[in-house]
Amino acid sequence: MAEPPRDNRPERPADLSDAAHRAAMRRQMEQDDPEPSLGRRFAQIGVLGWMTVLPTLLGLLFGHWLDRLLGGGITLAAALTMLGAALGLWLAFRWMHQQ
């Protein structure tokens, strides 16, 4: 027996209701979790900047103080500057993933 010819057109009511449901879900998600404002984005950039710069500068100052105290060259200043930069970058990376 031959099957009756199929209509290859998609079902309009189901497609339309699915599209409406997806649009409603997107609107609800936007209301639940809105995009941060421009001022908040600038504040986040500032926090990240200080979070990396401050440990670097503290390492430099402490290393320079130790070098002057011990009569060395710039060995401790360079080492503690790199250590401070690594600490600052790690703190910034961790903070970004918590946000």
Image: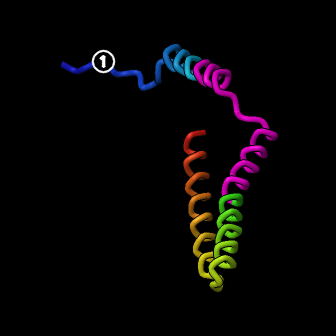
Say if 81 sits above or below 96 in the image.
below
Quarter in which the N terminus is drawn: top left
Residue 78 x, y percent position in the rendering: 62, 77
Q: Is residue 40 magenta?
A: yes
Query: Residue 29, how many percent across, how many down?
Result: 61, 24
Q: Is residue 86 left or right of residue 65?
A: left
Residue shown at 63% from the left, 19% from the top: 28
Asked where in the image residue 53 lies, by quadrant, the reply is: bottom right
Judge by depth and name the residue closer to the eye, 50 or 58.
58
For label 1, the residue is 4
Residue 84 location, x and y as percent? 61, 64
Q: Which residue lies at the image location 57% right of the left edge and 67% below the top edge?
A: 83
- The answer to whether residue 73 is left or right of residue 37 is left
Front residue of 92/82: it is: 82
Q: Magenta region's main secondary structure? A: helix
Q: Amino acid at mark 1?
A: Pro
Foreground of the two, 96 or 69 = 69
**Residue 59 x, y percent position in the rendering:** 65, 66
Above or below for 13 versus 58: above
| Magenta-span inclusion, residue 49 | yes
41 relative to 60, above or below: above
Span colored in magenta: 23-52
The residue closer to the viewer here, 84 or 62, is 62
Residue beneath the point at 76% across and 50% down: 46
